[in-house]
Image (cartoon, rainbow, N blue to C red):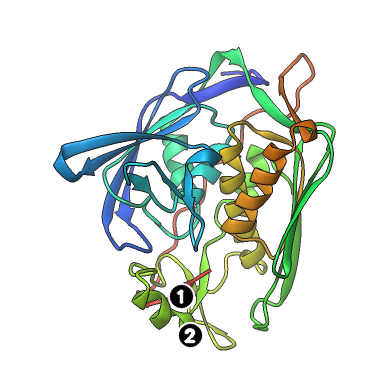
Amino acid sequence: MRAKVGYQTTLRERATVSGLGVHSAAPAQIVIQPADADSGIVFLRTGLPGGRERLLEARRSNVTQTSLCTVLGDATGASVGTVEHLLAALSGLQIDNAFVEIDGPETPIMDGSAAAFVDAIDQAGVVHQSRPRRYLKVLKPVRVEHNDAYAEFSPADHSFRLDVEIDFPSSVIGRQRRVFNVDPATFRREIARARTFGFVSDVQKLWQAGFALGSSLENSVAIDGEEILNPEGLRYSDEFVRHKALDAIGDLSLAGAPIVGRYRAYRPGHKLNAMALEALFKNRSAYAFVEAGAKPLFPALGGVRAPAVARGLRAGIGLT
């Protein structure tokens, strides 16, 4: 099928992924289903007490927590945690509309990257819909600062340019910076397989706080002092900054439309990404929603299947 550039997309058929939550260690199954044009990304949280079900739109207004992961929730207490990797896969592959049914409190961590979700979407297939895609175009700079970190949106002509820099005292990571023009091919090749990472020295404190209960070498890059514990090593020499880019793509998809602009972040995390998005929306003159016209804003869908998920040994890891 020839790609219809600038039109909305959804899945051709349903895709199913099952696994454990990295923080809760609870099992969950997600079923990603086709959705109508203009639906956006919507979660159906099932398995709540009393057999209740709740709909949660993937929107910034539904973000209830940004500590270690991004959590969507509502006033009833219904929530879905660690949504950023799935959202990054949907956004990175330019899937506009999907209905995501989940029966547990947290999206499965899989191998710590977005690769399993990309593979599931590939197997389901993608179809174009009759409605043109709507974009969020950045019109002027908006900047936020938090402690020693900062993030800034600024205008770009026709793409989403992601500029991420991290700086850790550990020599295993150090200072890394990557700049991406984000499109499906780049996401598949350069970002999707980058795994979450953490320090073994943090794990006891995180366990006591109820986090990282399901972390292991199968789903995280573990750093112990100046050593990487995963026997297979890194997938990229700068896998750490690439994963921060992956997180940012997922978090920023909560804008509700693909972004046309530049996002520059120094030492980003889920909280900083959420702050930047909130600051952008508070400044009504800094952005506009535009529909795709005759001139394409993004490259067409395409690319190869994601590589197989790597496996490692189980161990406790404090995540970042």
Crowding at mark 1 (Cα within 10 Å: few <14, some 14-19, many 20+): many
Q: Residue at x 35, y 52 (%)?
A: 106
Can residue 19 be spotted in the picture? yes
Q: With 88 as the anchor, is 23 left or right in this view? A: left
For the residues bearing labels 1 and 2, Cβ distance under 8 angstroms: yes
Q: Secondary structure at mark 2?
A: helix
What residue sits right under mark 2 in the picture?
A: 201
Tell me: residue 92, above or below residue 194: above
Q: Earlier in the sequence, mark 1 or mark 2?
A: 2
Instruction: Measuring from the top left, give residue 296's x and y in whole percent.
Output: 76, 22
The label on residue 318 is: 1
Query: For the N terminus, which image quadrant?
Result: top right
Instruction: Measuring from the top left, give residue 152's x and y in whole percent.
Output: 77, 51
- Total number of numbered labels? 2
Q: Residue at x 74, y 37 (%)?
A: 283
Tell me: residue 244, above or below residue 60: below
| Viewer-closest of 275 and 15 | 275
